[in-house]
Image: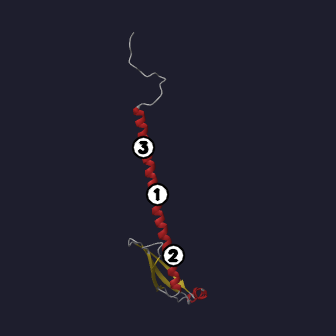
């Protein structure tokens, strides 16, 4: 009888070592791409959150400046307390424009510069115009 080397039959089940290694390599590559995308999205989220916080603090400073100008305080500064350590704000207002127009006789205009300083000493500045007239004074006096 003639002996033949053992050959797997066509019905044998299972994977070869090469097939398993290729499958693991593909899985590893896919996991690498997914994890990289996750960390990129997380980083973008944190950057966006910082930008939103800075914008909110800057708008808060604008409101403080408008109220200060309404109360004839042309400069001010401070911080945002323990919730935002290292952040500080300041504003400077200067009278601008002339009020020779009869409809604007009781109106004073101001150019205001507000500054938000971050903990790393980077500052963001915003300039705007505001005004004070008899109506704003009545609101100021009527406030508690």
Q: Mark 1 sits on what residue?
A: 42
At a point 47% along the width and 82% down the height, the residue shown is 111
Pick the quarter of the image with the C terminus.
bottom right
Figure colour scheme = secondary structure
Q: Are marks 3 and 2 in contact (CB under 8 Å)?
A: no
Name the residue tied to disc 2. 60
**Is the residue 12 above or below the residue 31 in the image?**
above
Q: Is residue 125 or residue 133 the one in the foreground? A: 125
Does residue 86 lie above or below 133 as drawn? Answer: above
Cα–Cα gap, marks 3 and 1:
21 Å
Q: Secondary structure at mark 1?
A: helix
Residues 94 and 14: in front is: 14
Question: How far from the left and from the top, in percent, is residue 85?
Answer: 44, 73
Report the Cα–Cα distance between label 3 and label 2. 48 Å
- Say if residue 115 shows up in the picture: no
Residue 143 versus residue 6 in the image, above or below: below
Closer to the camera in the image, 56 or 9: 9
Q: Residue 31: x and y, percent?
A: 44, 46
Question: How far from the left and from the top, in percent, is residue 130?
Answer: 52, 81
Residue 28 got which mark?
Answer: 3
Instruction: Look at the numbered discs 1 and 2 and tell me whether their residues touch, using CB distance below 8 Å.
Output: no
Task: Judge whether residue 31 can be spotted in this image.
Answer: yes
In the image, is residue 134 above or below residue 119? below
* Residue at point 48%, 27% (across, down): 13
Q: Position of residue 11 (x, y in %)?
A: 49, 23
């Amino acid at each position: 009888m003639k002996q033949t080397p053992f050959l797997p039959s066509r019905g044998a089940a299972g994977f070869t070592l090469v097939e398993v290694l290729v499958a693991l390599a593909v899985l590893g590559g896919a996991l690498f791409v997914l994890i990289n995308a996750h960390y990129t999205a997380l980083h973008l989220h944190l950057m966006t959150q910082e930008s939103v916080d800075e914008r909110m603090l800057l708008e808060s400073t604008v409101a403080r400046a408008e109220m200060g100008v309404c109360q004839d305080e042309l400069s001010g500064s401070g911080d945002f307390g323990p919730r935002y350590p290292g952040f500080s704000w300041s504003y400077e207002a200067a009278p601008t424009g002339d009020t020779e127009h009869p409809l604007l006789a009781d109106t004073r205009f101001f150019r205001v510069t507000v500054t938000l300083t971050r903990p790393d000493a980077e500052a963001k500045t915003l300039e705007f115009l505001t005004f004070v007239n008899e109506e704003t004074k009545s609101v100021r006096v009527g406030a508690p």
